[in-house]
């Protein structure tokens, strides 16, 4: 059976594709990532992933999606920093069963700040007792290294 290409020819084809096709794909990706619709989608997904990480008690995802300067405000008035917030989710008595959002809006200030508002519906176990909670929630996300991360959150009673 005869080979179609020799190893040096395969290498030349690969190099050709690398230099001539990659820039076109890369520039399309940059255009898409910087579009308003794409940022809105990414912030929406960051909120969803953050809420799901609370349900799953996923320390790695909570850490990844939270900025070091996080200020996390509860509807009771309690304020936590990043470490305290994550420790409470992972090791605390409050165990999220599910979270859902209603009436969510996402507004941008510049290219790297997003303000998210919604009604947060929570089903959880609190110290062994099932609870249902409905609170207002405002979250501020900042784009850091192409990832939307939570900088501040404040819940309020409805």
Image (spheres, rainbow, N blue to C red):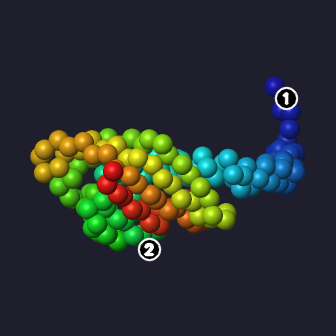
What label sits on residue 115 in the rendered view? none
SS for dot 1: loop
C-alpha span from label 1 to label 2? 63 Å
Q: Nearer the viewer, residue 80 or 57?
A: 80
Report the residue at 26% width, 62% height from top. 76
Q: Secondary structure at mark 2?
A: strand
In the rendered structure, the answer to whether residue 31 lies left or right of residue 63 reads right
Mark with earlier residue (1, 2):
1
| Side of 56 where 130 appears, left or right | left
The residue indicated by pointer 2 is 69
Q: Position of residue 84 (x, y in %)?
A: 29, 69
Q: What residue is drawn where x is 67% and y is 47%? A: 37
Q: Is residue 28 above or below residue 110?
A: above
Position of residue 64 measured from the top left corner of the image (x, y, whole percent): 45, 61
User: How far across and down, in percent of the image, does residue 99 sit?
Assistant: 35, 43
Q: Nearer the viewer, residue 114 or 76?
A: 76
Point out the residue furthest to the top here: 1
The answer to whether residue 150 of the structure is visible from this angle is: yes
Name the residue beneath numbered marker 1: 2
Picture mark count: 2
Q: Is residue 57 above or below residue 111?
A: above
């Amino acid at each position: 059976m005869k080979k179609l290409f020799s190893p040096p020819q395969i290498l030349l084809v690969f190099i050709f594709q690398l230099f001539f096709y990659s820039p076109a794909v890369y520039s399309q990706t940059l255009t898409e990532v910087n579009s308003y619709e794409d940022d809105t989608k990414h912030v929406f997904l960051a909120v969803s992933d953050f809420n799901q990480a609370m349900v799953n008690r996923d320390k790695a995802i909570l850490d990844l999606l939270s900025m070091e300067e996080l200020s996390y405000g509860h509807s009771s008035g309690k304020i936590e920093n990043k470490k305290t917030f994550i420790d409470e989710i992972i090791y605390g008595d409050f165990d999220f069963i599910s979270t859902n959002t209603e009436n969510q809006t996402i507004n941008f200030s510049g290219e790297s700040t997003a303000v998210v508002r919604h009604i947060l519906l929570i089903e959880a176990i609190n110290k062994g007792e099932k609870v249902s909670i409905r609170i207002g929630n405002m979250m501020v996300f900042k784009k850091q290294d192409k990832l939307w991360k939570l900088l501040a959150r404040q819940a309020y009673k409805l």
